[in-house]
Image (cartoon, grey):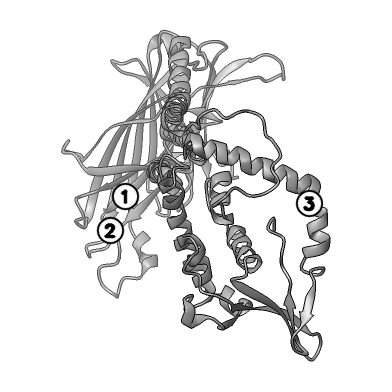
Amino acid sequence: MKKLLVVAAVLLGLAYTPMVSAQNLQAFTINSFEADYYLAKDDKDVSQLKVVERIEAEFPEYDQNHGIERALPQKYKGKDLNVQITSITRDDGTAWNYSTYAQNDNLIARIGDGGRYVHGAQTYVITYTQRNVITFESDSGGAFDHDEWYWDVNGDEWQQPISSVVARLHLRESLASKISKDTICYTGSYGQSGADCAVERSSDAYGQVITVTSTRSFSAGENLSFVMGFAQSTFQPYKIDPALLALIIAYFAGSFLLPIVITFIIMYRRWSKSGRDPKGRGVIVPQYKPQKGMNPLMADVILNERLQTKAVSASLIDLCVSGYIKMYEVTKKKVLKDKTEYELELMKPCDTLTGEMQEVARLFFGNISKSGVGERVNVNEKSRKLYAKVASLTKTMGNTVAGQGYFVSNPETARRKYAWVSGLIGVICIVGFTVLQPWLISLSISLAVSIVIILLFQRIMPARTQEGVDAKEYLLGLKDYMELAEADRIKFLQGPDTAEKIDVKDTKKLVKLYEQLL
C-alpha cells in the first residue's frame, strides 16, 4: 500500500500500579474507525474537505490510560492543508477536553478527560476541515490528465488492532459527475498493496455516497487507503490571494525592517545629541613630547574611550623612567632552559603622583609611602593576581578623565545603559526563537539586528569635550611622530633585548630605561 499521510494515534497516561509495565500502556483496542468525508470546492475550484471521524476504543478496567492522541496531517506532498479542528465530542455530543501541538508536519490532538483515567468503551468524534487535498496527475508524462484524491483513512502508525475501518465519501451530484475513474481501495502496512476492502455506491440527501470498507480486521500498523479520479481541471491548486500575499509580505517586511529602522533612528539621534564629539581642527600636527600632566592611563582612555591592559604596562614603564621604580631582569636557573623574569624595586615614595598612577604602583607594591621604599616584588608572581585590581582601575579612570574635563561623562557609564537595553532585547529574541512562530521569528531576527546596531552605537556613545578633542588630536600627533621618527630607534635602544643592563648580581641585571616616549 502506498503511504501518503501519517495519521497516527497513541495512548495517553502512565501506569497506575507497578504491576502495569510501560509496554502494556498500548494494551487497548480500537473496535471501529469510521470517517465521513465531505468533499467540495470553493468559488476558485480549490478542494475543501470536511471530515467527521468516529473512533470507538476499548480500554482496560484498571487505571492505565487518560485518552488518545490523534495526528492530523498538516501537509500533503509539500502543500499546506490548513487543518482546523472544529470539535471533539463523545457519542452523546458532550465535549472532550483536548489540547493540540505540532510535530512532524502533523497537528496532534491530545484528547483526555481532565486528567482522569478512562475505562471500558469510549467514543471520540473528531470534526475538522482541510483544503487543497487534490493532486494533479499525468498518465503520459505531459500535461495533467486527471485530478486525483488519494487518501489514507486511519493511518499506519496505530499500535493497536482495529476491528473495522469504514470511509464514506460524500459528494454533491455536480462533483460526482466529474468522477473519471472508479474508486480503488488498498489495505495493509507501509509498502504493501493488499485489497482486502470493498467499494459501494449509494446516495442520500447530500448527494452521492461512496463507501469504502475493510473486509477484515487490521493488526497494528495497518491502514485503509482509497484513490478517486476526477476529470482534468475539476479542481484548481490553492493560490494565495495577491492582496493577501501583498499584505503578508508587507507585514513581514514591516516586522523585520521597522524595528531596525526605529532603532537606528533612535540611536543616531541619541549619538548626535549626546554622543558626538565637538569638531576639532581636522589637521593632525606632529608633536614631540607628551602634554604636561598627561600619563599613559589618561592617554589611553582619551584615545580609545576605554582603558586597555597595555596602558597599565606602559604606566609601569613610565614609573621606571621617572625613577620611582627600578626594574631588574632575573635569570632563573632551570634544568632544561634558564627562564627570564623581572623584578621591581620601589625607589622613592609615590605620594606626589596623581591618584591613578599611585593606583598602578599599588598594583605591585603594598606600601608606596616612604616606609615602603626598598620593597622588591616579582612581576610574574604579581601579574597572576592583578585582574580584579585592573578592572577596578578601569572603572575609576572613567571618572578621572570626566572629572578633568576630557569627557562629558564617564565613558563606561555612557556605554553601560545601552548594554542593559541590548540585554533586555536579547531576552525577547530568545523567547521569540523558542516559540517558533513565523512572525515571531521574523521579529526576533529583526531585534537581533537591532542589538547589533545598539552595540555599534554604544562603542561611539562616550562624548569628549572640546578639551578632550584637542587632547586626542595632540596624542594622535605624538603617535604619528613616534611611529615615523622614534619607533625604530626606541626599539633598538630600549627594547626588552636591547636596553642597557647593569650587572648587580650574577643572576640579576638592572634595566636602564630613560626614554619618556616609551
Residue 283 picture quarter? top right
**Residue 48 x, y percent position in the rendering:** 40, 20
**Residue 444 x, y percent position in the rendering:** 44, 36
The quadrant the C terminus occupies is bottom right
* Element type at mark 2: loop
- Tell me the residue that label 1 is attached to: 68
In the figure, 154 relative to 344: above or below? above
- Tell me the residue that label 2 is attached to: 65
Instruction: Look at 51% across and 74% down and name the residue there.
Output: 349
**Residue 422 x, y percent position in the rendering:** 42, 42
**Number of other residues with Cα within 10 Å of mark 3, as a class: few under 14, some 14 to 19, many 20 or more:** some
The quadrant the N terminus occupies is top right
- CA gap between label 2 and label 3 equals 85 Å
Identified by mark 1, the residue type is Ile
* Element type at mark 1: strand
Q: Are marks 1 and 2 in contact (CB under 8 Å)?
A: yes
Residue 170 picture quarter? top left
Identified by mark 2, the residue type is Asn
In the figure, 45 relative to 165: above or below? above
Q: Nearer the viewer, residue 262 or 296?
A: 296
Q: Is residue 435 left or right of residue 122?
A: right
- CA gap between label 1 and label 3 equals 83 Å
Q: Is residue 429 left or right of residue 195?
A: left
Instruction: Look at 79% across and 45% down and name the residue there.
Output: 484
- Tell me the residue that label 3 is attached to: 486
Q: Are marks 1 and 3 in contact (CB under 8 Å)?
A: no
- CA gap between label 1 and label 2 equals 8 Å
**Number of other residues with Cα within 10 Å of mark 1, as a class: few under 14, some 14 to 19, many 20 or more:** some
* Element type at mark 3: helix
Identified by mark 3, the residue type is Glu
Q: Which mark is residue 478?
A: none
